[in-house]
Image (spheres, rainbow, N blue to C red):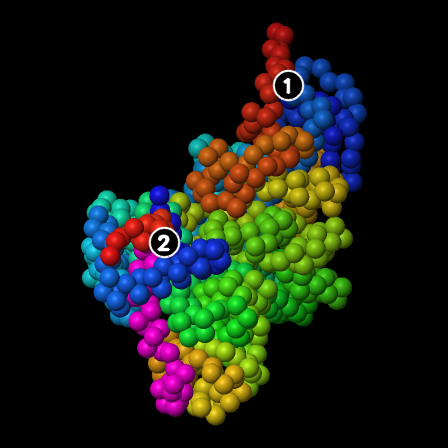
Amino acid sequence: MSRNLLGIRHISAEDLRDLLALGTEFKRRVLQREPLPRVREETVGLLFFEDSTRTRVSFEQAAKYLGMNTVSFTGRGSSMSKGESLKDTILTLRHERLTTVVMRHRMPGSAQLAARYFPGPVLNAGDGEHEHPAQALGDALTILERKGHLDGLIVAIVGDVEHSRVARSNAWLLSKLGAEVRFVGPKTMLPSHTAMLPGSVHYTLETGIHNADVVMCLRLQKERMLDGLLSSVGEYARMYQVTRQSLEYASPDCLVMHPGPLNRGIELDDDAADGDCSVINDQVENGIFVRMAAYWWALDRTMDDLKKVAA
Amino acid sequence: MRTLLKNGRILDPSQNIDMVGDLLIEDHQIEAYGPNLDVADVQETYDCTDMWIVPGLIDLHTHLRQPGFDHRETISTGTQAAAAGGYTVVCCMPTTQPTLDSPSLVDYILDAAASPSSGGAFVQPIGALTVGMKGEQLSDLSALRRAGIVAASDVGAPTQNSRVMKRAMEYCTQLDLPIIAHCEDLELSQGGSINEGPVSAMLGLRGIPRSAEEIMVMRNCLLSLHTGCRLHVTGVSTWGAVEMVRQAKYLGAPVSCDIFPHHFCLTEEDVGEFDTRFKVSPPLRTQVDLDIIVQALNDGTIDCIASNHSPYASHEVDVPFGEAPFGISGLESALGVTLTHLTHKGILSPLETVRKLSTAPAMVLRLEGGTMRHGETPVAQITVVDPNHRWRFDVGRTFTKGKNSAFHGMELQGKAVVTFCGAEIYRDAAFPESRVTTSRKRS
């Protein structure tokens, strides 16, 4: 038995709580150097059709902590760049005796396609602008550590929500666990229809982060300007940059988050990025522990199974 | 050779005939019809009790793919699919390789369609409006017309340049050649794969805004109004597009339009978890659109129903949603879907159903067919429909090579069961042998 982590949208609140609890427990064990389970029979294929360093490293680290073998595949120079279809790539990996697939692909829904042809767990490491579930789990664990709970929190997601898988996965996760999600940004970057995406829409930073407990900035893709979504980076920064000053509108101990890589001076100023409320580095570290949780959960193992791994 | 279709419900929208009676085909011509025909020396009798006898269906929007994309469909498999779907005429789009912009290619298609390996349906080619469908230089439309095209269209590569479109319309007016327009502003739809709306926002797919369609419907309708060119808008999908066509007709523009079956019964929500079978162009819209569309079908603003038969090979469809092609194979499901979702729900009467699928398409392109009037078709084109036959649409049982269908697995009520197209007769298993009586002529 195994499960897929294709997106947060498909996962129940109960499973999300389990995943976060597992993440917490893995973190405790790693930090306290307690024994970790060894899942030696598993081989993880890290399939990155799109370039990514941090996500790939995080998944690889998590796998190594669990004693899993990893095999890396990247787009360039592989069969994937020689015109092989995604379906055939997946079928091939299956017969290379990989047991788990972690995949990043530029097309939304590609993880669903992979899961149709791969018998073991498929973990989505980002499918286009659709979902990035492990990122959202790491972000949630970070908030949970600082705030102790998620329900009732106001979380403002600032930036290009329309084109962000990070925003989508976070919106699903946080709202499923009881937080209020706000999307903040220029109209050109916010979804024009939110009936099926949980979040309210705010066009000014002041109203969007008013009383917020968490401000989550998204990376600004500068090439978006070519698409006419923006007049200039300068104008965006003037209107939506999260600064010590704009944080006055938020609740006093508001957390500042960013999935990275950071455009310093655009999404955030130095004070906000490096201030006491910034948890950007925690996000990176927690990313590893929730990925351990994701592997464990996807292999259909529980907290009880983990607790059996004796000290 | 005399064939008698006995005791069916004869529906001929061209004469507003709706009566129970018999129809006699003699030497592949419709010879007579009426209640209780008294005919001797009949070789074959088809008992059509509880069935409809209608003019053969005519499709204004078929992609036959040959030459160039024979792995998706050929003229042979496409015309077999047509006959099985109740069609006796399919108008094939110029989306071939090379593009259908030269008379020799028209000859090639007509020859292939006339060959014995082809199925029992006539093929009427639609020529490319511009060379290579590039939207720049007009095709040799006069020569193409002489070779046999029945309309001109740049379908999937709609002419963006309004000046080119205006000139094309002026030129086609002179040739009395209708233009079939797929209306899409490619700048607005760029990168999109489903309707811009709540589902695209949820799935992280780029949306195609409704304005991409409506702006071009409006532009083309205005150009038609001012040039007098006959314009047929194919595949309306939004309430706004429908209202534009309604307005153009009110203003007196020579405009008609059609709709594809998936646009009157499916919505963006059917895309589900990135199901590429539901990726169509224009995209599936919303319930609000469906409500207006259904009214517009009923009040006649939407003239025709076209199959938009767009077959693809399985490997082309089994890819991530954004990479999948647009379109479904529609010839063998169009009638069943129409009967199930419009006729049996009381939106279209049986006579109006046949008008949308046969008589109106014939009138739009001035084709022979769509009628039972004596001498108006060179050979008999008749379809027998069992309006109540319940069946499950299964792509495993279709004649088309394209197994890409949003309707796979759908329960349908109503099916074409016999298609007469001149000497060619297609009989479906749903019309049992026991209903056919053959008698040898006494010597």
Up/down of B176 relative to B83, above or below: below
Is residue A286 in the magenta section? Answer: yes
Marker disc for residue A303: 2
**Does A107 lie within the magenta span?**
no
Q: Residues within 10 Å of mark 1 (few under 14, many from 20)?
A: few
> As displayed, is residue B94 above or below residue B215?
above
Q: Mark 1 is on which residue type? A: Arg
Which chain is disc 2 placed on?
A: A
Q: Which mark is residue B435?
A: 1
| Chain under callout 1 | B
Q: Tell me whether the residue at label 1 lies in contact with that at label 2, contact meaning CB atoms closer than 8 angstroms.
A: no
Return the x and y of residue B278 as percentages of the image width and height: 51, 51
Label ID, residue A148: none
Q: Nearer the viewer, residue B136 or A35?
A: A35
Badge 1 and badge 2 in a common chain: no
Q: Residue at x 54, y 60 (%)?
A: B199
Horizontally, residue B360 falls left or right of residue A55, namely right
Residue at 43 percent across and 52 percent down: it is B96
User: What residue sits 66% from the left and 40% below the top?
Assistant: B340
Residue lying at the far front of the rendered structure = A311
Residue A151 picture location, percent across and down? 52, 68
What is the x, y in percent for residue A239? 50, 88
Outermost residue to the bottom:
A245
Q: Amino acid at mark 2?
A: Met
Q: Which residues fall within the magenta stretch?
A: A269-297
What residue is rendered at 37% in x and 78% in y? A279
Number of numbered callouts drawn = 2
Locate residue A272: give its quadrant.
bottom left
Q: Position of residue B84 (x, y in %)?
A: 54, 34
Front residue of this view, candidates A171 and A196: A171
In the displayed structure image, the side of residue B181 where residue B70 appears, left or right: left
Q: Is B52 placed above or below A64 here?
A: above
